[in-house]
């Protein structure tokens, strides 16, 4: 399954991303780093099933692009 995870650079989001990847899912994180830190996802960067976008979910063009590019997602918001 594919997941679009908002707030993916936070403590909970990064651990959830890791758990989803471990079970074989694809994960795309979007975060503006307002409360999270990029270092929380550093260990995930080399994984082919992982993608990180530094932006806000309020950016309609980025969100549209992600959904168009990646196809259907389950969306998890943190």
Image: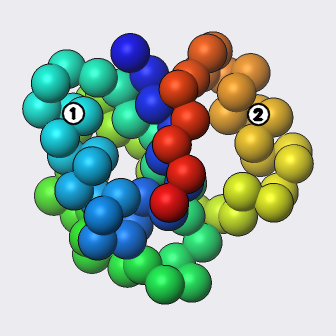
Place of residue 5 in the rendered image (x, y in percent of width and height, measured from the top left): 49, 46
31 on left or right of 44: right
Instruction: Indicate which disc, 2 or 1, sits on the residue closer to the N terminus.
Output: 1
| Residue occupying the point 36% across, 58% down | 13
Tell me where residue 38 sits by quadrant: bottom left
Mark 2 and mark 1: Cα distance apart in space: 22 Å
Location of residue 37 with respect to 28 vertically, above or below: below
| Residue 21 numbered mark, or none | 1
- Where is residue 49, by image quadrant? top left
**Residue 46 visible here:** no
Q: How is the image coloured?
A: rainbow
Q: Residue furthest right?
A: 60
Q: Residues within 10 Å of mark 2 (few under 14, many from 20)?
A: few
Q: Residue at x 21, y 33 (%)?
A: 21
User: Could you say where residue 15 lies in the image, as x and y percent from the top left?
Assistant: 22, 56
Quarter occupied by the N terminus: top left
User: Tag 2, which secondary structure?
Assistant: helix
Instruction: Identify the residue position indicated by label 2 in the image.
Output: 65
Q: Is residue 58 left or right of residue 43?
A: right
Residue located 56% across and 35% down the image: 75
Q: Residue at x 56, y 23 (%)?
A: 73
Front residue of 57 and 52: 57
């Amino acid at each position: 399954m594919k997941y679009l995870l908002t707030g993916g650079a936070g403590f909970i989001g990064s651990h959830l991303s890791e758990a989803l990847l471990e079970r074989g899912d694809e994960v795309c994180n979007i975060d503006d780093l307002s409360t999270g830190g990029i270092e929380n996802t550093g260990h995930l960067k080399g994984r082919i099933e992982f993608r990180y976008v530094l932006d806000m979910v309020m950016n309609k063009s980025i969100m549209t692009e992600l959904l168009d590019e990646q196809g259907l997602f389950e969306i998890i918001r943190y």
